[in-house]
Image: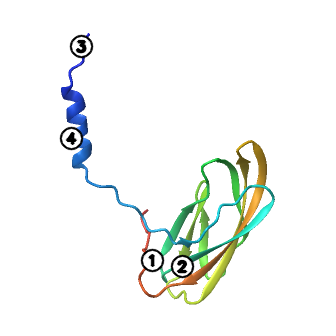
Amino acid sequence: MKISPVPALVLLMAALSIGPATATLNCLRDNQPYKLAGDSIDWSMTIKPGANCIQGLRWSTMQIFSVSIAEQPKRGELVLVGPGFRYFAKSDFNGDDSFSLVVVGKNRHDAGQSVIHIKVSSSGDGLVANLEGY
């Protein structure tokens, strides 16, 4: 049975006509990977007042079993989204905020947990996108 190359060509042309993929700005800065080995790590985030940031927590060799909030933010709202989180800065947010997460899972073959402390700083310069609807 011979397969016609026409359907493959049609699929390729349809894929190319969709346009380039667009990346969403990352609001975390200098976030180093955690190891799920009882470690504690500090991350930092910059966000505009009234904006929100969604961030996954899985690294390439990890399987996440659970994410929980160890410390709630005081000047924003935090929602867990699968193996990640979404932080919402209040519209009058100015200054700093912070929160902590506990991640439980398996890194390669070893099960464990890590604590991530995230310091949030306000950015009034418009450099960090509002990721609403992301």
Q: Residues within 10 Å of mark 1 (few under 14, many from 20)?
A: many
Q: Position of residue 76 (x, y in %)?
A: 59, 78
The circle drawn on residue 69 is none
Whole-angstrom CA distance, mark 4 to mark 1, is 34 Å
Q: CA distance from mark 3 to mark 4?
A: 22 Å
Residue drawn at x 48%, y 80% as measured from the top left = 50
Q: Is residue 77 above or below residue 101?
A: below
Q: Residue 49: horizontal and vertical position, in percent? A: 49, 83
Q: Amino acid at mark 3?
A: Lys
Residue under label 3: 2
Q: Judge the density around disc 4: few (<14), some (14-19), many (≥20) Cα neighbours within 10 Å.
A: few
Return the x and y of residue 57 as percentages of the image width and height: 61, 58
What residue is shown with label 2?
46
Q: Amino acid at mark 4?
A: Met
| Category of crowding for the residue at label 2, using alpha-carbon neighbours closer than 10 angstroms: few (below 14), some (14–19), many (at least 20) | some
Amino acid type, label 2: Thr
Describe residue 76's horizontal placement relative to residue 69 as left or right: left
Which residue corresponds to mark 1?
128
The residue that disc 4 covers is 13
